[in-house]
Amino acid sequence: MTKKIAILPGDGIGPEIIHESLKVLSCLRDTHGVSLTWEVAPFGGAGYDAAKTPLPPDTLALCEQADAILLGAVGGPQYDTLPRELRPERGLLGLRASLDLFSNLRPAILFPQLASASSLKPDLVSGLDIMIVRELTGGIYFGQPRGIDQTDSGERRGYNTLVYTESEIQRIAISAFETAMRRQRRLCSVDKANVLEVSELWREIFVDTGKQYPDVELSHMYVDNASMQLVRAPKQFDVIATTNMFGDILSDTAAMLTGSIGMLPSASLNATGQGLYEPIHGSAPDIAGQGIANPLATLLSVAMMFRHSLDDNESAERIETAVSRVLDGGLRTADIAEGGASVSTQTMGDAVVRELAQL
Ligand code: NAD
């Protein structure tokens, strides 16, 4: 069956890096016979420019009907003075909510060719391959009640609520176990069960869900220890599953272990496997239009899209192998060149496509 992809280039470097992804999709379709169609739509600041809203109704309709969505990035200084509800980032929140994208997969992969770019010693991180599964639509970022008010004595007080229902925990647990099944089958659930009741429930439901996945080795770790272990011995982890806020923090730490923001993909999935795929970096307005952005995080997001939403591991592996071979050949964009020679966005994209065509 032909798979349909909604393509949202977005803002800043978004259109430049998405341009390279379209070459990869064309190569898979034309050289490898993968049955694909795609349609491009305005989103974020570009959505506002086209239709006065960051998530135009036609764009949302396209995304709802697609098997997967590929996003460049959104945002830019020209949109920072818009009313909050019209800002590009609101489009992203709206899309996540509309499609119920509750499971955020954030890999931290360090290609051995780039081990010296990490702030950790190369032997600690070379070949690092962690997947963080972060709950994305619940927890303390959304819990009610929330606000700032006054106590009876007139003192101001701020509060948020950390709340998870059983079903919210169960669906992220299933997503995490399924992810672990596709990898080394080791899942570490990160919580704060020594202090928080909500974490006790989280842990209980992970243990229960784990009974359906006897092949996955489940362990538990407190979040403070997990943050320490991530910088002490990160290769001990295969899959980490955690709540929205803990995942927000741990996934940024894990990303930085790799030394380059331009290399890391991400996915946000719903219960039907439909997903939004995007690099973890933003729209990089400081380098937009210069043709020097690293397109590899976006190309690796395309690989994740084939693996997690399009049920096509072969294409995913082809893209990842092509990227690895290009790095083996020594090609680097400026962000990963460590002061050495660098190539343009387009040259990097073309090199990946050349390798891909031969695989
Ligand atoms: P950023 O990730 O855009 O940039 C941080 C730094 O990394 C910059 O120096 C940039 O040049 C560099 N960089 C980022 N991606 C790169 C790439 N592919 N190749 C080479 N260098 C790259 O973060 P920021 O500067 O904090 O934010 C810029 C804009 O992006 C803001 O409007 C922000 O709201 C938005 N943003 C969007 C998303 C998203 O679309 N999901 C995520 C984060 C930030």
Image: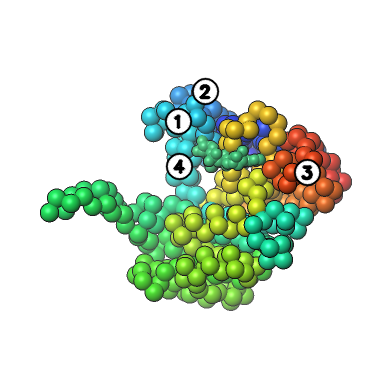
Whether residue 67 can be seen here: no
Q: CA distance from mark 4 to mark 3?
A: 38 Å
Spatial CA distance of label 4 from label 2 is 19 Å
Task: Name the residue that disc number 2 marks.
Answer: 50
Check mark 3 vs ligand 1: CB closer than 8 Å? yes or no: no
The residue indicated by pointer 3 is 340
* Mark number, residue 80: 1
Q: Are there few (<14), some (14-19), or many (20+) residues within 10 Å of tag 3?
A: few
**Figure quadrant of the N terminus:** top right
Query: Circles 3 and 1: CB distance less than 8 Å?
Result: no
Mark 1 surroundings within 10 Å by alpha-carbon count, few (fewer than 14), some (14 through 19), many (20 or more)? few
Residue type beneath disc 2: Ala
Can you say whether 250 is above or below 229 in the image? above
Give the residue type at disc 3: Gly
> Distance between the Cα atoms at labels 3 and 1?
35 Å
Between discs 2 and 1, the one toward the N terminus: 2
Q: Say left or right for 61 vs 193.
A: right
- State which tag comes first along the sequence, 2 or 3: 2
Residue 230 seen = yes
Tell me if residue 316 comes above or below residue 193 in the rendering: above
Note whether ligand 1 is within 8 Å of mark 1: yes
Q: In the drawing, does residue 37 fall left or right of residue 211?
A: right
* Mark toward the viewer: 3 or 1: 3
Q: Residue at x 36, y 71 (%)?
A: 195
Image point (70%, 31%), residue name: 291
Give the Cα separation between the discs numbered 2 and 3. Answer: 40 Å
Other residues around mark 4 within 10 Å, as few (<14) / some (14–19) / many (≥20): few
Q: Can you give x and y, in whole percent of width and height, for residue 120 in the image?
A: 65, 61
Q: Residue type at mark 4?
A: Leu
Which residue is label 4 attached to?
93
Circle 1 SS class? loop
